[in-house]
Amino acid sequence: MKKSVVFIILICMICVLAVGCAQGVSRKTAEEGPVEKKEDLIVVGFSQVGAESDWRKENSESMRSAFTRDKGYELIFEDAQQKQANQITAIRTFIQRGVDYIVLAPVAEDGWDTVLGEARDAGIPVIVVDRMVNVEDESLFTCWVGSDFRLESQKACRWLKVYLDKQHFKPGDVNIVDIQGTIGSSAQIGRTRGLRDAVIDNGWNLLDAVPGEFTQAKGREATARLLEKYDNINVVYCENDNEAFGALEAIEAAGRRPGRNIRAGDVMVISFDGVSSQALDNLRSGSISCIGECNPLHGPRVRKIIENIEKGETPDKYEYVDEDIFSGYEGITEISVDGKSYPVKIMGK
Ligand code: GYE
């Protein structure tokens, strides 16, 4: 055989081998069942809590736009409608389908040991996002990224304390109700705890704490009931903005005025998130006094984590996001928590 013919045959054999190998390392597609792969996409199964708030909608959007085909991903998005049972089913489906990564935004902290054990046995990394999981063995998840909910609350409560002092308002005259988030979620636990600690430290009165499930409808209902029950409420602490929107409606319906002029009988509203333009407008008008920012844009953060794992790196177990505090009141430009100072972002008119 001529040398050139041998050379061509050799080249052809290398090509065939190369194609075979590429198929060998290929990933699964998002169709049902572990399937042959046509494109080299990383398949991510994301179990989202629901669509209860503006924050959640932004968060879903951030995830959807971070994990697109043109970025090399296939995203399987499952909305759990605020039910943990739905999340457990979604995770089991992801395992059956053999996804490459599971991303979990857990509705509540407890109850994950068994299903995360199943994911670990299947060799699928689990990235927890937003709220945390409370598990016996922390190796059941790869890492977590989200907010420091207690710190958000400490900052908002500090702002309230500084504001009340400026108004020469006596601690014993401060009568607060807490409209809590979904009970058992990290956001609720951290924000409730931050308020309880501040109530004790500052000598305020906490009249009541009731669940509002992070929704506008429940926030309205809960606030209306509380305003009927107590005639001396002057601070409504809402554990997210949507509850605050409901609280504003209830305050007005009860013939009270939401605002900062607490000496003149206003009801102050404190809240968390600061995501929607409605919330920022309420800060500008003074109907919400202060918002502890909660950043929902976790999509690119989770993608970065996956990129690093793909490179063989080990991500930090916990990644906290930096957040601000917002108000429309110009008199407080900075607050401090545990010796650290935080600028207050003032929403101009
Ligand atoms: O503050 C609220 C949402 O877990 C940080 O859940 C999240 C919270 C957020 O529904 O609006």
Image (cartoon, helix red, strand yellow):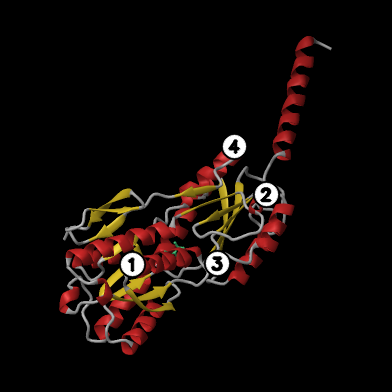
The residue that label 1 is drawn on is: 271
On the image, the x and y values in percent for residue 316 come to 54, 43
The disc, 1 or 3, on the residue closer to the chain's N-terminal end is 3
Q: In 3D space, how far apart are the residues under numbered discs 1 and 3 (Cα atoms)? A: 20 Å
The kind of residue on which mark 2 rests is Lys
* First-in-chain label (4 vs 1): 1
Looking at the picture, how far across and down is residue 329, in whole percent?
19, 61
Residue at mark 2 to residue at mark 4: CA–CA distance: 22 Å
Is residue 71 among what the camera can see? Answer: no
Could you say which disc has been placed on residue 313 in the image?
4
Q: Residues within 10 Å of mark 1 (few under 14, many from 20)?
A: many
**Residue 35 percent location from the top left of the image:** 72, 52
Q: At 33% across and 49% down in the image, what residue appears?
A: 339
Between residues 252 and 177, which one lies in front from this camera angle?
177
Residue 178, given in percent of the width and then of the height, sits at 38, 74
- Residue at figure coordinates x 31%, y 72% from the top left: 204
User: Which SS class for mark 4?
Assistant: loop
| Residue under pointer 3 | 108
Is disc 1 placed on a helix, strand or loop?
A: strand
* Secondary structure of the residue carrying numbered label 3: loop
Q: Which amino acid does label 4 sit on?
A: Glu
The mark lying in front, picked from 3 and 4, is: 3
Residue drawn at the location 47% of the way across and 54% of the way down: 146
The N terminus sits in image quarter: top right
For ligand 1, tell me if the residue under mark 4 lies within 8 Å.
no
Q: Work out which quarter of the rendered image holds the C terminus and state it.
A: bottom left
Q: Name the residue under label 2.
A: 28
How far apart are the two marked residues, 3 and 4, measured between alpha carbons? Answer: 29 Å
- What is the quadrant of residue 114 in the picture? bottom right
